[in-house]
Amino acid sequence: MAEPTPRATTAGAGAEVRARAARVVQAVRADGRSLTVALAQLPPFDDPRDRALTQELCFGTLRALPRLEALGAVLADRPVKSMDQDIAALILIGLYQLAETRVPAHAAVAATVAATRLLGKPRAAGLVNAQLRRYLRERASLEARVARQPGVAGLFPQWLQERLTRTWPEHWPAIIEASNARPPMTLRVNVMKTTRRAYAEALAAAGLTARPVAGAPSGLMLDAPVPVTRLPGFADGLVSVQDGGAQLAAELLDAQPGERVLDACAAPGGKSAHLLERAGGRVALTALDSDPIRLARVHETLARLGLAATAVIAADAAAPTDEDLTTGWAAQRYDRILLDVPCSATGVIRRHPDIKWLRRPSDLHRLAAQQARLLEAVWPLLALGGRLLYTTCSLLPEENEEQISAFLARHPDATEGPIAGPWGLARRHGRQTLPTRRGPDGFYFALLHKAAP
């Protein structure tokens, strides 16, 4: 996400942005809610630039949370009361503006202090003002003081940094650096409507530059992110925003015209759309997801791109009903199955910085069990000779190669297909991309073939 350019704004609008951002950060930090959900639940903005600034403040604050919290603790005379967690979040947002953004210091302080009234706590105005102004006066010494504290340098929870260090001893510093950076903006050209070359020319005509993505024949990475409204033909379905690593899924599954395909965990629909685009819309695609709310995004995505699935169904792929098994989606056999399982999402932290603070080590056992259930449930639905692509956006082996190793041991009718290409790293089973500054997010892929018993 690019940092919004500072603009002239009314004091009221600036305060409203800070107040909304504080509520979102509080929802993540104190209440354990998803950043995506908390942002989606905000009231509409009159000016889209206010929404962009709110998002920047939330994403940036959560990326730098350990350092900002350490600064807040040094600046505070006493701990903030539990009932004032919104004020604590507001101070973090104020510190982020002063430390990391181009917002003028006087404007950042004034708008942040004014936000205390919108939060219903005007008595906190003096506290907020004092802490932010002290930071401005003593910035160098305060930053040096907190830099020595555990967790501040890497901006990562200790347990996760230790896991990454063990799993990726040669790569973990680059992984953490990329995960703490703003992500690049990558596009997927709709090859049913245009070509990558033609769309790159359309971008250039609009003053935007991009380069091809390795391993993704329809991928273009922009040199600088922009709002989707600036993308030529976005509303007409010429292009979608999708990370280059995510685009590898449809390429590896390689669904052909006339085949029956199941996308078992389809929301928000980017991979379903890509499968249809590659096959010219001539695959019988069933898109499944257990979350009806997120499934609405699949309908929206397909409609914008002018695509049609055979069926879009709200159902849990791991627990088909009796009706599903007798006459529904689970009664069919599929030539191709895409299984993009729920996971720790440790490979996409730069797009979802709240993952660092919401995920717990105990989550991994639960997620691995869910992944195993999904594999067991959909494997019988794969036709003989069919291909199943298992994929995660995780960097952790218990969700990736260890999961596939255990599955192959349980299923003699499953064989692993080779995955090669100018991208990623080969693992004991499957292949992994790692997040890099100008590369893809972190994704894992394993290709399974079904043979006769």
Image: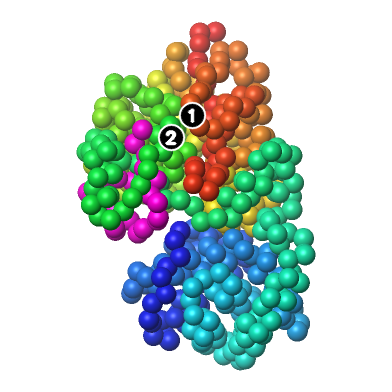
Magenta stretch contains residue 286: no
Q: Is residue 350 above or below residue 389?
A: below
User: Helix or strand or loop: what does disc 1 sit on?
Assistant: loop
Instruction: Tell me what residue is drawn at x 42 percent, y 85 percent.
Output: 12
Q: Amino acid at mark 1?
A: Pro
Image spot of residue 49 (x, y percent): 37, 70
Do residues under tags 2 and 1 come within 8 Å of each other at their CB atoms?
yes
Residue 423 visible somewhere in the drawing: yes
Q: Nearer the viewer, residue 127 or 265?
A: 127
Tell me which segment is drawn in magenta. 217-240
For residue 285, which quarter of the picture? top left
Find residue 214 and name its label: 2
Examine the structure image and report whether residue 229 is included in the region drawn in magenta.
yes
Quadrant where the N terminus is found in the figure: bottom left
N-term mark: 2 or 1: 2
Marks 2 and 1, how far apart at CA: 7 Å
The residue pinned by badge 1 equals: 422
Q: Is residue 141 left or right of residue 293?
A: right
297 left or right, relative to 362: left
- At label 2, the amino acid type is Ala
Residue lying at 27% horizontally and 38% vertically, measured from the top left:
197
Position above or below: 138 against 213 = below
List x then y, in percent, for residue 151: 73, 59
Q: Tell me if I can see residue 241 in this picture.
A: no
Q: Residue 70, position in %: x, y?
A: 71, 70
Secondary structure state at the residue bearing disc 2: loop
Residue 50 locus on image (x, y percent): 40, 72
